[in-house]
Amino acid sequence: MPEMSTRATDAVAAPPEHATGQVPAAGPGLAASITGLRRAFGGRTVIDDLSLSIPSGEFVALLGASGCGKSTLLRILAGLDTDIEGDVTVARRRAVAFQAPRLLPWKRVWRNVVLGVPKAGRAQADAVLTEVGLGERASAWPVTLSGGEAQRASLARALIRQPDLLLLDEPFGALDALTRLKAQELVGELWRRHAPAVLLVTHDVDEAVRLADRVVVMKNGRIEHDIRIGLDRPRDVGDPGYAPLRGQLLQWLGVH
Amino acid sequence: MTATNVPLPAFGPPVATERITPRHRRRLRVPRLARRLIGIAVVLAIWQLLSSTGRLPQTIVGSPLAVWDQGMTLIGNGELGSAIAASLQRVGVGLLIGGVAGIVLALISGLSRVGEDIIDAPVQMLRTVPFVGIIPLLIIWLGVGETPKVVLIALGVMFPLYINMSAGIRAVDPQLIEAGRTMGLGRLGVIWHVILPSALPQLLVGLRFALGLAWLALIFAEQISATNGLGYLMESAQELLQSNTIVVCLVVYALLGLAADAIVRGLERLLLSWRPRMAGDA
């Protein structure tokens, strides 16, 4: 396990009258810490008094019906949405992979990977691209990649930042079923190797159970359920503990 | 076991069928360039025929061969060369000034809300004035020297570049800007790595329009009592009733326009190589 005491954290729009001691000390041991978060669009409150802590190195899957605000939460943690009330503290070294790969089409794959990373060059890009199985395509233009390849490039772009917190916003949502399984496997492997904390936003219960240490279910703007997945890895659908967990999560999501 | 080994039912309900016939490619393919040249050759041949049979009198315009001879003479005595040089210099300077002005204004208006509010409305208003209409004003303000000519070309160039560049900046995909921000790019980084490359295709469209307008502006500009340049050559030929010289100049204008187009196409190929090949590129 990586050292936990030296992790740098950022406060995302902490209110000036921030009182220490009132909130969990986000810092050592926590990749993200959220207390009393509120976000409204116009008059509609999407996130309402939400609290969540993610210990460093933990893989958390965030489930919720569409429109429940889970992507909004991820965007807040990414620092993209600062119209918020409450306390949010996140690891300074964080990276995001979105549902669409969002590669810049005018930069070759490896240049997309090193973009924004000071002093990173071709060698570092090749290393992470090889790790995601895309070493051969480093000099390709993004338009020539398949959907799965583009998503792997997007993961490499996140990986090269050596994030303490990896934010994944339904990164497999647009992939076909077979490619999705491979991509899930890759994410699991990268997590084991690099041990970042992960917040995976998804609406796929199986994906959550397969990958995560812990699954949280969002509803009515807050975390309604929080469950630990105790199954041994690598996980197998045939595991006797699997079906009850799946059933429980589906029930929480309102599917019977 | 392969799928073809699965036993098929003996017969199903009757279905009306048709055979998809493979398309036959034409055997003989004349290269595109050759086909285009054929068209031009036919026009020249008809023109030459009309001239040689006297249907097209010399006083209207000479035969293609006579025009060619006149062109050779003008090249030989250096008149055409110096005229082209003077005109190109005007277009070059005007293009540079108008280009910088248009692009800088587009950047200010495209990248800041305040800039947009201040710059966009007046520029859009001025754009509706046909720019050659201000020639009389330019002459009053700037006299008849080199300055009004260059200014006219710069004005002609500025508007298409401004409009296309600012439209290109506004059309940037906000998702890519967001991605850039999550990768730690600051405001300048986002402009440089995301916004400007994204606006580049539209800027090149603007450049193509701008070059077309630059030639047009040049013709008008060189009728403001010029003492050199292609427009001057045409003016003096008109006074001496040398229609062949005028035709030579028109051909030169056309060739320069084609060259400008080729330059922009080359730039597009060079700068936009990341784009998927477009239909009709071959």
Image (spheres, coloured by chain):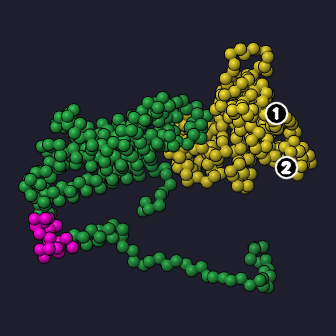
Chain colours: A yellow, B green
Image point 11% across, 74% down: which residue? Answer: B54
* Label located before the other in sequence (1 or 2): 1
Name the disc covering residue B125, or none. Answer: none
State which mark lies toward you, 1 or 2.
1
Magenta span of residues: B45-65
Q: Amino acid at mark 1?
A: Ile
Q: Choose between B153 and B129: the one closer to the eye.
A: B129
Judge whether residue A38 is colored magenta: no
Residue A91 makes an appearance in the image: yes
Query: Observer-nearest residue: B99 or B282?
Result: B99
Label 1: which secondary element: strand
Q: Residue at x 48, y 57 (%)?
A: B277
Residue under disc 1 on the same chain as residue under disc 2:
yes
Q: Which of the two residues, A200 or A183, is positioned nearer the viewer here?
A: A200
Image quadrant occupied by the N terminus of chain A: top right
Residue A91 horizontal side relative to residue B281, left or right: right
Residue under the point 30% across and 36% down: B97
**Local crowd at mark 2 within 10 Å, few (<14), some, or many (≥20)?**
few
**Compared with residue A122, is residue B73 higher up or lower down, i.e. above or below?**
below
Is A159 on the left-hand or right-hand side of B233?
A: right
Q: Is residue A129 left or right of residue A45?
A: left
Callouts 1 and 2 close, C-beta under 8 Å: no
Estimate the x, y position of residue B29 in percent, counting from the top left: 39, 74
Residue that badge 1 annotates: A223
- Quadrant housing residue B1: bottom right
Give x and y (percent) for residue A225: 86, 36
> Is B105 located above or below residue B156 in the figure?
above
Q: CA distance from mark 1 to mark 2?
A: 27 Å
Q: What mark, if any, has residue A236 been given in the picture?
A: 2
In the rendered image, residue A233, in percent from the top left (x then y), is placed at 83, 43
